[in-house]
């Protein structure tokens, strides 16, 4: 398991998709977002992942029924990427040169 995946343990949910977010850090994992390298049996790279609770993860992976517009899900993922990267940068897990 990569350091980025491991780093998700007990972190806050950065997706915070209302009303699906359960806010439980015990269920937070690194949720891989869509990217050009994602496909059948291929996940995006770990740096294209965000900290998300099980409820929000189900929404972005299509396992939860919802009536949210696709644009709202995309906004949530972009906000989550910024929040997650901020935590990762602050913890020295990723660096920006």
Image: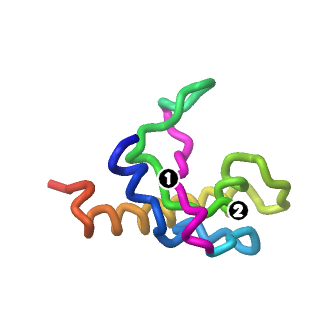
Residue at 80% from the left image edge and 54% from the top image edge: 64
Q: Is residue 27 magenta?
A: yes
With 63 as the anchor, is 87 left or right in this view? left
Quadrant assignment, res 85: bottom left
Q: Nearer the viewer, residue 42 or 10?
A: 10
Query: Could you classify mark 1 by the number of other residues whose Cα lies within 10 Å: few (under 14), some (14-19), or many (20 or more)?
Result: many
Q: Residue at x 76, y 74 (%)?
A: 19
Is 40 situated left or right of 84 in this image?
right
Q: Quadrant of residue 65?
A: bottom right
Residue 56 place in picture, x, y as percent? 66, 61
Identify the image quadrant of the C terminus: bottom left
| Residue 73, image x, y percentages | 66, 59
How many numbered discs?
Answer: 2
Q: Pointer 2: what residue?
A: 55
Q: Quadrant of residue 17?
A: bottom right
- Location of the N terminus by quadrant is top left
Q: Mark 1 — residue?
A: 30
Q: Earlier in the sequence, mark 1 or mark 2?
A: 1
Q: Secondary structure at mark 1?
A: strand
Residues shaded magenta? 24-36
């Amino acid at each position: 398991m990569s350091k980025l995946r491991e780093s998700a343990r007990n972190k806050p949910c950065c997706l915070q998709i209302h009303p699906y977010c359960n806010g439980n850090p015990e269920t937070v994992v690194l949720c891989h977002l869509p990217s050009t390298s994602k496909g059948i049996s291929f996940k995006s790279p770990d740096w294209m992942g965000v900290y998300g609770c099980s409820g929000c993860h189900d929404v972005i992976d299509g396992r939860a029924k919802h009536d949210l517009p696709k644009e709202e899900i995309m906004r949530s993922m972009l906000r989550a990427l910024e929040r997650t990267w901020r935590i990762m940068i602050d913890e020295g897990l990723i660096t920006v040169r």
